[in-house]
Amino acid sequence: MKVLIDHISKTYVDRKGERTEALQDIHFAIEENEFVVVVGPSGCGKSTLLNIIAGLLSPTSGQVIFEGTRTNTKPHTAVVFQDFALFPWRTVLKNIVYGLEEKGLNKTEQSTIAEQFISMVGLRGFEKKYPHQLSGGMKQRVSIARALANDPLLLLMDEPFSALDAQTRTLMQYELSRIWEETQKSFLYITHNIQEAVFLGDRVVILSRRPGKVLSIMKIDLPRPRNEHLTVEKKYLEYVNAIWRYIKEQAWEALEEKT
């Protein structure tokens, strides 16, 4: 076992003392070299869960365990956010080596590692470019390379392609699937897009409306490597429809509660 999300719950308390329960008893494991996707209706606590796993937020109860050891505030993770989070004054190369600088690696080690991941994400020739000179898809490639360069135990991705146009998003899904196959790391990917979840994941964790609870964990038994032909196959569409039934039911319940 690589990572255990061990009965995580999270309740927010505002200044007036009013409580909002975001997550309730979330429990699942992420195995070594596994691609797990978390999907659920809007506001179900997906990003809250990711921030807890990343050590950016403390749970109200429960814990995250990495390889059998309880985590502290700096778990072995790297995060790719939807807004790229690049340093605008740093080049592509300098953005990617930032974490390596913080680790104290020398220049030669930094360059060797950075070049490996620049090549992996298809950015050779762009090392000296600045973020404002890149497209959205290229910026996200830099973010992925920077995260992987730090050799995390678990790569966390919070709706990383949501800001991209539809065509670029589809291409980045293909690229990410290839990158995961090359690195064979554990990935946890947050999305509200069911098709994306089925295309990328080995398993899909389906959360309920708030407070987020695990409704189902669906194993995606589809061949790899994944490509565009997969999305018209009957089995793929069956998985998409099965997950949609869960999400639709939750969305209707939330709507009825408001009315």
Image (tube, rainbow, N blue to C red):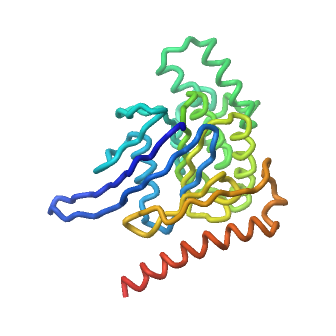
Would you say 254 lies left or right of 92 here?
left
**Residue at 43% in and 64% down:** 44
Depth check: 154 or 31 in front?
31
> Based on the displayed image, in which of its 4 quarters is residue 24 positioned?
bottom left
Task: Pick out the residue farthest to the right.
Answer: 229
Query: How far from the left and from the top, in percent, is residue 105?
Result: 54, 14
* Quadrant that contains the N terminus: top right
Location of the C terminus by quadrant is bottom left
User: Residue 156 at x, y = what percent?
Assistant: 53, 44
Residue 99 horizontal side relative to residue 183, left or right:
left
Residue at horizontal 54%, vertical 56%?
38
Q: Is residue 154 above or below residue 37?
A: above
* Residue situated furthest left in the rendering: 16
Give the side of residue 148 with respect to residue 236, left or right. left
What residue sits 55% from the left and 77% below the top? Answer: 248
Residue 128 in which image quadrant: top right
Specify the quadrant of the image occupied by residue 106.
top right
Residue visible at 68% across and 43% down? 138
Position of residue 240 measured from the top left corner of the image (x, y, whole percent): 67, 68
Residue 20's place in the image compared with 121, above or below, is below
Question: Residue 118 or 40: which is nearer the viewer?
Answer: 40
29 or 49, which is in the foreground? Answer: 29
Where is residue 238 drawn, in percent x and y? Answer: 72, 70
